[in-house]
Amino acid sequence: MSEEDRLKTQRIAKRDAMIELGVNPWGGRFDGAVSTDLVRAQAEPLGLEAGVKSEVRVRVAGRIMLLRVMGKLAFMTIRDGAGTIQLGLSKAELGEQWPVVKKLDLGDIVGVDGIIGKTKTGELTVWADTLTVLCKSMLAPPEKWHGLTDVDLRYRRRYVDLFANPDVRETFAQRSAIIQAVRGCLVDLGYYEVDTPVLQPIYGGAAARPFTTHHNTLDMELFLRISPELYLKRLLVGGMERVFEISRNFRNEGISTKHNPEFTMIELYEAYADYEVMMERVEQMAAAGFNAATREGVVKRCAAIEAECARLTEEDRADDAKAYADENHLGAYHEARDGIAAGRLTGVFAGKVLDFTPPWPRRKYADLLEEYAGVAMADSAAVRAKADALGIEHAKKADAVVVNEVFEATVEHHLVQPTFVYDYPAAICPLTRRHPEDDSIALRFEAFAATMELGNAYTELNDPAVQEANFRTTLAGEGDETMAVMDEDFITALEYGMPPAGGLGVGIDRLVMLLTDSPSIRDVILFPLQRPQRGEPSVAE
RNA sequence: GGGGGUGUAGCUCAGUGGCAGAGCACCGGCCUUUUAAGCCGUAGGUCCUGGGUUCGAAUCCCAGCACCCUCACCA
């Protein structure tokens, strides 16, 4: 028998022993449990001295994280959605329920009724008089001090990661708060939230390879959307003047710390606006997300790192790369905290302070190219020479494609602070309106922060003839990842007339990364795509 | 796809060409104020997989698999 089986067998025996004692190991409805932070809030005004019990009764429930049984008295630390609290259980108080305590394990979920008190050492404790088993855990939880650190296992068993590592749960709570705030921000501006097709017969709105699938009854090929753009613009035609969608998009591309094959984007369209209005929308949404999560998060994280640093010995510092990194980031956190106190929207990402306070710097694409690559955007020969110098293969590529590759190689890594880069080469922007004074420029911007592309926006192209021509033009060097996929119905929609509009897409996962100091997109996606492991369900097997 | 790294007990990790190690968890004993509880005593291993070198491989070499980092592509 393997160690794992042996541990499980022991728990099975305890489960059966519970049943013998007349206890249902799987629990049931448990009304009126108070979250642990509320218990703490309730205890505060009592001003309890160490060793004193109050007369305030509470009911709490949570997973057993620590367990200390000594003879006829036991202490356990349970964790619920809000935090942890200590429970005190004694043979004297529990009476005939006491034997059940002996059958509890780390990881079990329990509820108790009892009174609030403080132990001799001053720890806030719920002294239980009734114990309710809510769920017997059949597997040993991770080590109590380090939690689950194996990255592979953390993603594969995110449910364990979540209950074992409170920081992880905090990050996803922040993700939820950020999305709610962004949504609220747009609803307040009079936007409709809409849902458009995920399964699309023609994919478009972005340059990416799609996932393909098949509908049996209609016997047709379908694509998982790479973007909702062309459907949302149809809604503008229909008179829905402000629409947004929080859209799961699917792109059959590489996986990295910044890319997951399915990712969440908020895309919005606003009639009678343009890309400058969209810049304001980005600033507003980022501010809403910041206020919902980062403002408090920075202060919490400061305190957490300080506490951690105070506890660390020299030896720990040398051994623990993460602790060392955290300590290195403390300076940035202090700076961000001071920034917030001074009324700015300062957060920390990867050890750098990012300032989201509007207005963000607005930089012209051509100026940045001039500044960092030393070439003029229109000077094709100079751009290609620069490409040579950078080792970029460009012989078979169109000018605009080469310009953009040089831009990406020379400029993007300088864009640390939140910045709008605007007025892109028109040829790589088939869905964008041209600059009124220069046909080679498109009214497009991308928002950058921490060198990541955070968002992409246009003054939308609403001339059906130009749109149709753009769809028919595939640029050399774009490969099969082109935005130029003909969508005739979309042209028809434009022929009926789409109001002039601004449109914007913001990568939600990336926004959450930036606002929660999460260096990998996998830290903000609950179940990032992973190859199935042996023994895991897979249709192919 | 290229480059670098990791894979040892349920978890966190040491380790060495010669019997497989620690801490936590688990099991047994003592224990009514502990809190990373403590003390005593046990038990627990496909050292990722498959080859090769060797008297002997968990260790060295090769290949594969998984994951992480990085570059490329992309958002």
Image (cartoon, coloured by chain):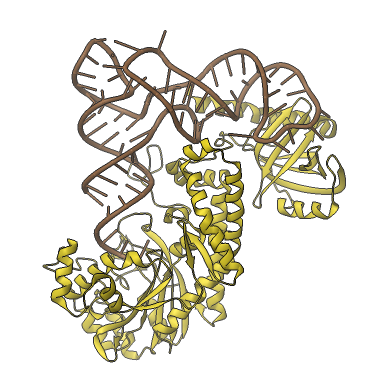
Q: In the picture shown, does residue A241 fall above or below A217? A: below
| Total numbered circles | 0
The brown chain is B
Residue at 86% across, 43% down: A53
In x, y percent, where is residue A305? 57, 50
State the residue in front, A61 or A219.
A61
Residue A293 visible, this orientation? no
In x, y percent, where is residue A507? 42, 67
Residue found at the very far right of the displayed protein: A55
The answer to which quarter of the image holds residue A188 is bottom right
Q: In the picture shown, does residue A452 fall above or below A153? A: below
Residue found at the very far left of the displayed protein: A395
Q: In the picture shown, does residue A310 fall above or below A265? A: above
State the residue in front, A149 or A27.
A149
For the C terminus of chain A, the image quarter is top left
Left or right of A404, for residue A155: right
State the residue in front, A44 or A198.
A44
Residue at 36% across, 58% down: A259
In x, y percent, where is residue A285? 51, 73
The yellow chain is A
In x, y percent, where is residue A93? 84, 34
Residue A434 visible, this orientation? yes
The answer to which quarter of the image holds residue B57 is top left
Left or right of A390, for residue A121: right
The answer to which quarter of the image holds residue A256 is bottom left
